[in-house]
């Protein structure tokens, strides 16, 4: 049994970034293809709400985009900005609330690919987020939004685990469902990082809550923000050339929304 530290996993950006940053190339390639296929006009300016450690931001910035992002977690924002600076880039992440934000200049595209949207706990917050994105996009710009839907035609997944390694650091991440309340639309989950270094082995364990969305519930929410139109829907295979069908079995979904 590993010695356990109880806390917020988002307060450990080094380990979070290793786990969630390992598949960055598939996501970056997918985003580039979405910008090319679905945005009207060139895409140069990007924004990431809930940017976390900036695992995608700094790679897109190195590719020549102007990228900024916000996140509620100060430690994640600091980690993101320090990495941008190490690579000779401007520290463009800032602390902010993705439920309600405004940018000084419209951007060509925005992205939020790994379920952070579901941290918005109420319908009002989710709608406010989409309205903020719509205000921040120029006409013809796109928002690439990824999340886990709650399937209605089959049981949802109750547990996920994955691992990543960088040099002598290895992290095993696990997520499991503690409770699902379909009436209140709350999914409470446990999350842990098992961290292995040459000198230490320990576990960080915490808990988080997500808002639940069926395909129909997500469709109704998107209809409340008519400034954004659904141009394409994909799964987590990250193939922009292959749209997927939204039905009762849909679970891992990426919406490509375009500003009218």
Image: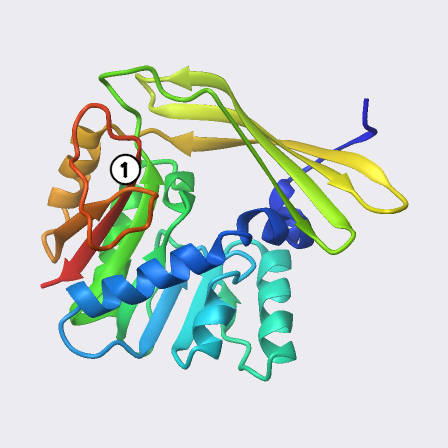
Identify the residue at horizontal 62%, vertical 52% (top origin): 18
Crowd band around label 1 with a 10 angstrom C-alpha radius: few (<14), some (14–19), many (20+):
few
Please give left or right for residue 55 compared with residue 138 in the image. Answer: right
Report which residue position mark 1 lands on.
123
Identify the residue at horizontal 64%, vertical 53% (top origin): 13
Q: Across the whole image, how many numbered discs are drawn on residues?
A: 1
Percent from the top left, x then y, of residue 77? 57, 63
Identify the residue at horizontal 20%, vertical 31% (top origin): 215
Q: Quadrant of residue 81?
A: bottom right
The front one of 161 and 53 is 161
Please give left or right for residue 106 compared with residue 117 in the image. Answer: left
The front one of 46 and 1 is 1
Q: Quadrant of residue 216?
A: top left
Quadrant into which the N terminus falls: top right
- Residue 139 makes an appearance in the image: yes
Percent from the top left, x then y, of residue 126? 30, 44
């Amino acid at each position: 049994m590993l010695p356990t530290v109880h806390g917020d996993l988002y307060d450990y950006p080094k380990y979070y970034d290793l786990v969630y940053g390992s598949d960055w190339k598939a996501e970056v390639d997918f985003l580039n293809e979405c910008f090319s296929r679905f945005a009207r006009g060139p895409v140069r300016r990007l924004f990431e709400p809930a940017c976390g450690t900036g695992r995608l931001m700094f790679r897109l910035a190195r590719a020549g985009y102007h990228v900024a992002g916000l996140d509620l977690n100060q430690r994640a924002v600091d980690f993101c900005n320090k990495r941008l600076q190490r690579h000779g880039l401007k520290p463009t992440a800032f602390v902010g609330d993705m439920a309600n934000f405004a940018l000084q200049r419209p951007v060509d595209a925005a992205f939020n690919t790994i379920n952070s949207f579901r941290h918005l706990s109420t319908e009002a917050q989710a709608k406010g987020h989409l309205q903020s994105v719509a205000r921040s996009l120029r006409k013809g710009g796109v928002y690439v939004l990824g999340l886990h839907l709650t399937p209605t035609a089959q049981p949802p997944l109750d547990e996920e685990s994955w691992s990543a390694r960088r040099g002598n650091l290895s992290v095993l991440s696990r997520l499991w469902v503690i409770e699902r309340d379909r009436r209140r639309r709350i999914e409470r989950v446990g999350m842990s990082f098992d961290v292995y270094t040459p000198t230490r082995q320990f576990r960080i364990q915490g808990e988080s809550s997500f808002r639940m969305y069926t395909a129909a519930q997500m469709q109704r929410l998107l209809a409340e923000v008519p400034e954004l139109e659904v141009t394409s829907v994909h799964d987590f295979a990250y193939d922009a050339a292959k749209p997927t069908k939204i039905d009762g079995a849909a679970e891992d979904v990426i919406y490509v929304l375009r500003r009218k």
